[in-house]
Image: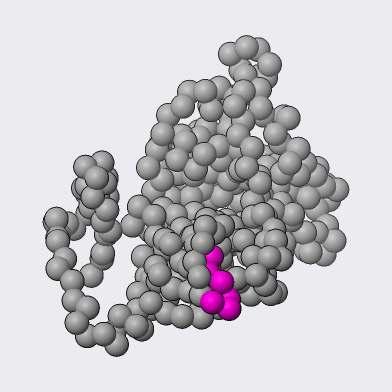
Amino acid sequence: MELNVKYMTRNDCFTAGRKIAPKGLMVHSTATPGVMAAEWFSRWNKSYKAGETNRQVCVHAFVDDQGVWQYLPWNHRGWHAGGTANNTHIGFEICEPGGFSYGKGSTMVGYNVSKNEAYFRKAWQNAVELCVLLCKQYGLTEKDIICHSEGSKKGIASNHGDVMHWFPKHGESMNSFRVAVGAALNKTSTPGDVSTEIQVGDVVEVKASANSYYPGGASIPTWVKTGSYHKVTQVISNGRTVVKGGKSCVLLGKKVDKKNGRESAGIMSWIDKDALTLINSSTKTEKLSKANKYYRVQVGALSKKNNAEAILKKLKAAGFDGFIKFE
Ligand SMILES: [Zn+2]
């Protein structure tokens, strides 16, 4: 999934600047045949107050068969639901393909299912991957995903039919969408679950087959792959796995000379764990030297994740590094 980020700084929703703690995701579709994700920027990056547009609306992202265009920071309060879901939900629009029109209500007239099937599958897949990325980032599951029409039934969104006026044409529903997200979430590692994976201090090699640091990220120069190994500097941030382009990443710091093992200043880039081969594990050597025991300082045991995060923040502000463990 390609993630492009370009904030709609001219939109009044952006300038309003309200933040949310995302508790769910809301799936919309555009009801505008044939207008793709990148094209929405010039349509919506306008100010209602300044009289440049007659609508007060903004979503976090648009998704099409090519990828995702993010137009608001994820924790920015969007104007997508027409209800209280704006206070809790990240909203994104799946772009509908062209070649049909709208009749009464949300009836698609002249929609050619077989012609649009390939587009639908790609856009669907990108939407699934976006949901996986956001679920990991905000500690959500597929159960926290609803569409606009489901939000309307719950009384937290305006009376719109999306996406249930469209998905069933391709034999899908919000339930099958949630199942797809759930399956993809289970395939990838869960947040914080780094105990059996790459650890800080491990020496790794970047696979020759890896092209970019993570999906949608910068391309990896050849010297990074062939010249040296790299030392893992960081595996979590704010108590969570760092996810970029839908993939769990680790930070590579110092580079390690392949011949003499000498360390020197390195690339300092986050990289998809799947792009790495473990050369030398720091934990294996630790386990071998049994003398390596630690005194651990526990600050609190809390039932609510938010409270734990608040304490970690205080701890960090006071100059201590720490992490959250859920057990
Ligand atoms: Zn909608």
From the image, which quarter does the N terminus lie in? bottom right
* For residue 281, side relative to residue 29 (left or right): left
Nearest the viewer among 321 and 189 is 321
The location of residue 275, given as percent across then percent down, is 60, 71
Q: Residue at x 24, y 45 (%)?
A: 319
The location of residue 227, given as percent across then percent down, is 65, 70
Q: Residue at x 52, y 32 (%)?
A: 79
The location of residue 283, given as percent across then percent down, is 35, 79
Q: Within the magenta stretch, is there residue 27? A: no
Residue 226 lies, with reference to residue 168, above or below; the image says: below
Nearest the viewer among 305 and 225 is 225
Magenta part of the chain: 255-260
From the image, which quarter does the C terminus lie in? bottom left
Nearest the viewer among 114 and 309 is 309
Q: Residue at x 67, y 54 (%)?
A: 218
Q: Quadrant of residue 113?
A: bottom right
Q: Residue at x 68, y 42 (%)?
A: 30
